[in-house]
Amino acid sequence: TKTTKPRVIFCLGGPGAGKGTQCERLADFGYVHLSAGDLLRRERASGSADGDLIESYISEGRIVPVALSLGLLRKEMERLDAARFVIDGFPRNQDNLDGWKDLMTDFHVDCVLFYEVPVEELVKRMLSRGETSGRSDDTVSVAEKRIATFNDATMPLIDHWERTGEIKVIRIPGDRDVEEVWHLTKAAIEPYLA
Ligand code: UP5
Ligand code: MG
């Protein structure tokens, strides 16, 4: 699509699906990587007035109100002023998507990369990362809640886009090794590089 607006790729998938791992590498192709979860964790750590609110959602695997997540994303996008962004872990529910459609008309969304990984593998990855990540949500009980939230709130967006064609969804098997998934990721974004 010809557009002068900055371009965005959304990256979604269950918790631990490998969104961050793959999105980081897209820097090789000029994409600035923004993880909504990382922005929320950074905001919480900064001593912001919203810190306790953010913690109350993350610790339950729930999705924060869109004003907060989109506010942080928007601020970073304006500060970085890039031509291409890959947004990792947003939008996660209908509220997020409605907020995006209302407030982000000055960005063009090219596609959604959707990493598919079986639940057992997601849990395994979250718990093994939990040994070193320091992430308070990498525990058995929160991992289960994050997966439930993903199934209840995020999957319906994927289904909706696939049904309507409103945004192209590219499904990528995320349960292969990192290099193989990267190979598939590069092939998926190739059409948007021109
Ligand atoms: N790993 C990666 N790829 C692998 C592969 N192919 N094979 C084997 N291992 C692989 O990877 C996870 C782990 O798996 C790592 O140890 C990695 O080495 C390994 P990672 O790339 O980190 O996966 P990712 O999908 O990024 O997992 P993450 O845990 O970050 O996903 P979540 O969606 O759970 O986390 P996020 O940070 O996006 O959100 C956290 C919380 O913030 C949410 O639960 C929610 O409460 C809140 N939130 C909002 O409320 N709103 C938002 O908009 C965003 C977040
Ligand atoms: Mg991540």
Image (spheres, grey):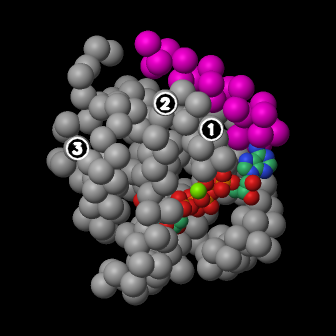
Q: Quadrant of the N terminus?
A: top left
For the question of whether residue 156 can be seen, the reply is: no
Task: Give how far apart the Cα atoms at labels 3 and 2 are.
Answer: 21 Å
Task: Give how far apart the Cα atoms at labels 2 and 1 are.
Answer: 10 Å
Q: Which residues are magenta?
A: 174-194
Q: Amino acid at mark 3?
A: Met
Q: Main secondary structure of the magenta part?
A: helix
Some atom of ligand 1 lies within 8 Å of the CB belonging to the residue at label 1: no
Residue count near mark 3 (Cα–Cα under 10 Å), binned few <14, some 14–19, many ≥20: few
Which label's residue is closer to the chain start, 3 or 2? 2
Report the disc number at residue 30.
Answer: 2
Q: Is residue 76 left or right of residue 147?
A: left
Q: Amino acid at mark 2?
A: Gly
Q: Residue at the spot x=55%, y=36% of the render?
A: 27
Q: Nearer the viewer, residue 81 or 26?
A: 81
Q: Position of residue 82 (x, y in %)?
A: 35, 37
In the displayed structure, 59 sits above or below 32; it is below
In the displayed structure, 86 sits above or below 29; it is below
Q: Quadrant of the C terminus?
A: top left
Q: Position of residue 4 (x, y in %)?
A: 24, 22
Q: Secondary structure at mark 2?
A: loop
Residue count near mark 2 (Cα–Cα under 10 Å), binned few <14, some 14–19, many ≥20: some
Number of numbered discs on residues: 3
Task: Give how far apart the Cα atoms at labels 1 and 3 are.
Answer: 25 Å
Q: Amino acid at mark 1?
A: Arg
Q: Residue at the spot x=49%, y=45% of the render?
A: 33
Report the disc number at residue 104.
Answer: 3
Residue 110 located within the stretch drawn in magenta: no
Q: Are marks 1 and 3 in contact (CB under 8 Å)?
A: no
Q: Nearer the viewer, residue 33 or 124?
A: 33
Q: Position of residue 112 (x, y in %)?
A: 47, 35
Which residue position is annotated with label 1?
25
